[in-house]
Amino acid sequence: MIPVSEARSRILAGLSPTPAETVPLAAASGRVLARPVKARLTQPPAAVSAMDGYAVRSADATDGAILDVVGSAPAGHPFAGVVGPGQAVRIFTGGFLPTGADSILLQEDAAAEGSLVTVRETVAEGRWIRPAGLDFTAGETLLEPGRKLTARDIGLAAAANHPWLAVHRAPRIGILATGDEIALPGEPLPPGGIVSSNAHALAALVRAAGGEPVVLPIAPDDEAAIIALAADARGCELLLTTGGASVGDHDLVQKALGPQGFALDFWKIAMRPGKPLIWGRLGDTPLLGLPGNPVSAIVCAVVFLLPALRVMLGQPAGATPTHAAVLGAPLPENDKREDYMRATLSPDGRVVTAFRKQDSSMLKTLARAEALVMRAPYAPALPEGAEVQIIRLDELGI
Amino acid sequence: MIPVSEARSRILAGLSPTPAETVPLAAASGRVLARPVKARLTQPPAAVSAMDGYAVRSADATDGAILDVVGSAPAGHPFAGVVGPGQAVRIFTGGFLPTGADSILLQEDAAAEGSLVTVRETVAEGRWIRPAGLDFTAGETLLEPGRKLTARDIGLAAAANHPWLAVHRAPRIGILATGDEIALPGEPLPPGGIVSSNAHALAALVRAAGGEPVVLPIAPDDEAAIIALAADARGCELLLTTGGASVGDHDLVQKALGPQGFALDFWKIAMRPGKPLIWGRLGDTPLLGLPGNPVSAIVCAVVFLLPALRVMLGQPAGATPTHAAVLGAPLPENDKREDYMRATLSPDGRVVTAFRKQDSSMLKTLARAEALVMRAPYAPALPEGAEVQIIRLDELGI
């Protein structure tokens, strides 16, 4: 049994980022940037008004002065002339500052009558002007590769005049659930059977993390079937299996795939839930074998697959993010396996309380969990109020 | 000018949840449930083994006893006979407990030889058995309407034998950017023009929040064009406009749509960024008019549109969630408008520091922001370390 952190390092070391593809800006949100986004223009392109009012020469615009309004400059319609002494130009937010003017008289500080405007408050030089390049300058790098693009980033890339962006391709993750006892939802159940839940839960998790799930048909506990279905995963960047990985006589994944050139790296980790975890390579395809227990499968996916997807998407490598929280109820001492306990969180996210029953078959408890409490091997018993590290499931979007 | 909370209440009161649609389980992740998910079966369906080992009668399975192995019960292959006195059945995780047996002898506590197995550790009655219904019972409600489905929920619904789920339809949000000065990314720029960023940033935000954006062509500052394009929004559950909403002569949205039956509710709110905010109804279609400044548009979307989408998706109504944090730098007193300041967060999310420049045209600052610091009207100056309420942008997925 190897420690969780070593298992994760060995998994991440075996993966590399997917190549880039070009996608339309409108489809790039949530994707991971593969090339820097540099500004293709300066924003604003020239000095513009930050408010509605009058573009004036500040030297003229003293309290009580009366100015001639010689034109207007709405956004998108620059004033072509020059603002001379004693003159003003009607201007609106975003309008280009006309030549000769150096500041804005606010609309609410002005009294307009016909083609004249009276200054009601002295204007300071440069007031209410956004200088050219206030936001960014042509050539400036605005977004770095490895960044998962937010809605705000899309706005920034648009403003910088990018109709297309280069992003990492979504890694295709083949998902192969094994077991004679499982059937897809709605399909006839075999005797002694249960409904398969792992493949679709993992597919949703893969999609939420930016991958492209490829759900393969269920493999019965039969070496030939596993071989045939694993072959269907060709072209995937990773093959994920569930089940067939424990220590009994029915641990078929290794048995079936060994003769097909499967190179095992490890298959037992010091973790609960999830002791049997296979990691290796089937030809060119990395293979991560998750346990068949639904809770173990998802918790192992949180701990190993999410970091793996980050590497494949070109994001910085590392463990799934953790946070400090305090215990809402005491915990017993831990044994030799690193433990990930399903737990609820207080509304402020600072108090974490583990469920009493932690059985790895209980999906209902997993669905209700808001966090996983992490416990190191041999961690001592802890009283209520003690600080622990947690993984927040809500922030992972899963 | 009306307060932010009143504006939000009036917006939310004018909206209702979209009807339900049936989607495949595999497409339901991230959707909002419209009907309860009840268990269609009991899980596990019968008592099963939690481990690999031997199903035994605990009365027989004392240290040193030798039992006859009369069959096997892998998952999916129940043993059809009965375990009699002095007998055992080989069993694997998930295998049905055979009639007659009442507990599991762990594989590591057993020594097998031919068809015999020697007990190496006395077995307690009921040990390593998962009773029928440990996870859930047929008819039990597992997931409630209004819940945004996670990957774990998908696993639970699958295990409960649901190939289809009823979810709220994604509300279609028409997005109409207005302004003579704007052009789509990559298109020729008009003189004095800038690239349109609002429509695509808002589309990404709508999609991240579970809506279906419909980006309409850009409307020039021309009443007839606005009328024609607003008509293109028919069939949308909400029409979102940006620009044309401020106090100058070029505030065209109201002017153009008034004669089309636009019923205004309010159009000025005590908020920064974002004073001009239109709310009303164009025929049957609610219309939310956001400011044209890109930062104002996105901040108003966070404060008003995200709660609106939650109501339309059948989620509980309420403000965008806030959290307590402490200031990393002092803040000046606030004026009469509720303020939402762009800010960065410490890695633990507990210290928030507002950017010095808060100009509402600066998209780069918005993209780099991790939180918005909320300041009530007339809030006093605050020192470093004072507690404030923040909106975390990362947890909104935008």
Image: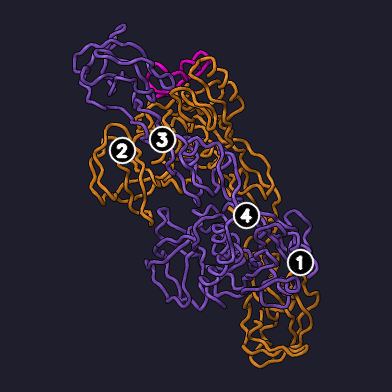
Chain colours: A orange, B purple
For mark 1, give the secondary structure.
Answer: helix
Residue B253: image location, x then y, percent: 71, 70
- Mark 2 or 4, closer to the camera: 4
Residue B328: image location, x then y, percent: 41, 64
Residue B7: image location, x then y, percent: 55, 71
**Which residue does the image show at 24% across and 14% down from the upper left?**
B85
Q: Are marks 2 and 1 in contact (CB under 8 Å)?
A: no
For the residue carrying disc 2, how many other residues have a C-alpha within 10 Å: few (<14), some (14-19), or many (20+)? some
- Mark 3 or 2, closer to the camera: 3
Q: Are marks 1 and 3 in contact (CB under 8 Å)?
A: no
For mark 3, give the secondary structure.
Answer: helix
Kindly report the distance in space between the C-alpha atoms of the residues bearing marks 1 and 3: 53 Å
Q: Residue furthest top?
A: B114
Q: Do we see residue A142 in this rendering?
A: no
**Which residue does the image show at 44% across and 21% down from the upper left?**
B76
Range covered by the magenta-colored residues: A244-267
User: In which quadrant will I find the N terminus of chain B?
Assistant: bottom right
The residue pinned by badge 3 equals A295
Kindly report the distance in space between the C-alpha atoms of the residues bearing marks 3 and 4: 33 Å
Q: Nearer the viewer, residue A124 or A160?
A: A160
Mark 4 on the same chain as mark 1: yes
In this rendering, the answer to whether A215 lies above or below B29 is: above
Which label is found at residue A174? Answer: none
Magenta stretch: includes residue A253: yes
Mark 3 on the same chain as mark 2: yes
